[in-house]
Amino acid sequence: MARASSRLRQLKNFTGLAAITLLSILAILPLFHIIGTVAINGLKAITRSGLDFLTKPPNPLNPSQPGGIAPVLKDSLLLVILSSIIGIPLALLTGVFISEFRSATISRLVFTLSLLLVEFPTILVGLYVYSVIVKPMGHYSLLAGAISLSLVMMPYVAVQVSEALRNTPRDVREAAFSLGVSRTRVVYNILLGAARKSIIVGVLIGVAKIAGETAPLLFTAGGSFTSQTTCALKPGGAIPLMIYEYIQQPGEGYRILAWGASLILLLVVFTIMIIAKILVKEVKL
Amino acid sequence: MSTPVLRVRNLNVWLSNHHIVRQVNMEVPDKCVYALMGPSGSGKSTLLRALNRLLDIYEEARVEGEVLLDGVNIYDPKVDPIWVRRRIGMVFQYPNPFPHMSIYDNVAIGPKLNRMVKSKRELDELVKWALEKAYLWDEVKNRLDMPASKLSGGQKQRLSIARALALKPRLLLMDEPTANLDPVATEKIEELIVELKKEIPIVLVTHSPEQAARIADYTAFLYRGELIEVGPTGRIFTQPRHPLTEKYLLRRL
């Protein structure tokens, strides 16, 4: 009797484990499939151009020598730098404000709004920037794209900064206050330093997030993928935008370039994420 | 008893709606160790944090009554809590040097932020002085740039003491400073406390009556937020006047 029930238990245990394993595999399979597809197609594309892929402008009409994505790479870099310059300082200030003046109504309002904005449809951010910046300026520009991206990044980074500050140990906070310095100095000279790694991680993930964003750029950045000059006030491209445009074009050259660009984007985002992951591991107090 | 450094009058503290410290009156004389002992949850740490207005940083805390530091009521609306905390140093239960700073910076940050020194040389001297006072200088003088997080527990606690001393405080508050240390490190900190009291009076919170008996000149017994009995340590331990004190010392509470 006892043996039979034990065998039943083992069977149940086995089926349970098997079901969980199977479901987990099913869940991560699409992810591996995506990465695999991008890697294979991207590698095929990049090997066709070699190093030129990073240094030459695109030449989609010649599939045997499709050129590269150099202009878009430069534009994307400028976009990320500009939006970081606009977004990170503001997000830091907001994050400090949210965490240090927690009970003030306005700070709670800002916090709730930030949480909401993190999940906000980014295409609406693009539309908004289109109506307040692109239209008055009369043309698309990388600056408008950068503002759009910074609006996407800011709420996320602000929430991360406030969480990082909130998670500084209570005794470190008390020790800082016990030195007889003002709240501003406690936060800027001591607590931000103590929480700096979590803050850097939040900022990095924010940057990775906008590096791959497409929707906020649709009506703001323009979308020229061949121009040799990169200027903030002129229209420009971005890697995700190029992928979006090129993959829809007929002609093998376009598709090759789009796949190659996808792989580069994937590598950039993964690198940032891996750096963030390593930093998270190092956070010790 | 000479004029007290710190005089507490009718002090009450509420956290949220809990009445944590009830109607406490006490006097801390100069050049002595004044121990606050009592079982956990008796309000010792909260009382201590009311003495340098550290409770101000918690919105749920409410304090009533007077705390006079050299005759000045630190809860007077005209008094700046930052000034109070600068005059009254504090050491905590868990050794807590700032983990991202070097040994040197941990000691230097207080004087630097308070603009106490005019030159780098003056700061160097102050840091050395504080580390010497905290019995740490000889162990760290060759590695002042090392992150404070690499020190041992006892060293970290002595660094925290040096950090507080660097501000040249009038009074030092210690919240169970040896609760997380091994016996050897504890002994060293206790030696240090006895040495320091010659210049700076110390209010020491402890959950160990033995520690109070070893190093305190005066001992106060706190129970459920009320100050049950105060007196010279020897008298408290040999002839407790209140039955609760006696029970506590006999470990029957």
Image (cartoon, coloured by chain):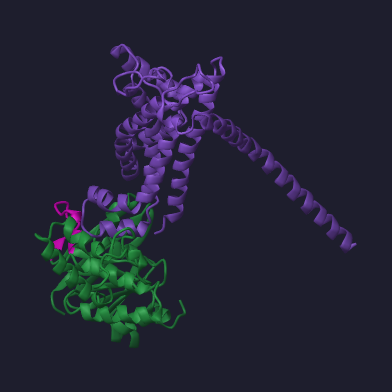
Return the x and y of residue A215 as percentages of the image width and height: 46, 23
Residue found farthest to the bottom: B238
Compared with residue A277, is residue B228 higher up or lower down, i.e. above or below? Answer: below
B104 displayed left or right of A217: left
Asked where in the image residue B54 lies, by quadrant, the reply is bottom left
Return the x and y of residue A112 as percentages of the image width and height: 41, 34
Q: Nearer the viewer, residue A246 or A194?
A: A246
* Residue A94 seen in this snapshot: yes
Quarter containing the C terminus of chain A: bottom left
* Residue B242 seen in this snapshot: no
Q: Colour of chain A?
A: purple
Residue found farthest to the left: B118
Q: Residue at x 34, y 26 (%)?
A: A147
Compared with residue B77, is residue B253 higher up or lower down, i.e. above or below? Answer: below
Residue found farthest to the front: A64
Q: Residue at x 31, y 60 (%)?
A: B98
Compared with residue B214, is residue A199 higher up or lower down, i.e. above or below? Answer: above
Q: Nearer the viewer, residue B192 or B66?
A: B192
Q: Colour of chain B?
A: green
A247 displayed left or right of A2: left
What's the magenta region? Answer: B71-87
Asked where in the image residue A135 lies, by quadrant, the reply is top left
Q: Residue at x 66, y 38 (%)?
A: A29
Q: Residue at x 21, y 78 (%)?
A: B197
Q: Is residue A31 on the magenta stretch?
A: no
Return the x and y of residue A217 as percentages of the image width and height: 41, 22
Asked where in the image residue A107 lies, by quadrant, the reply is top left
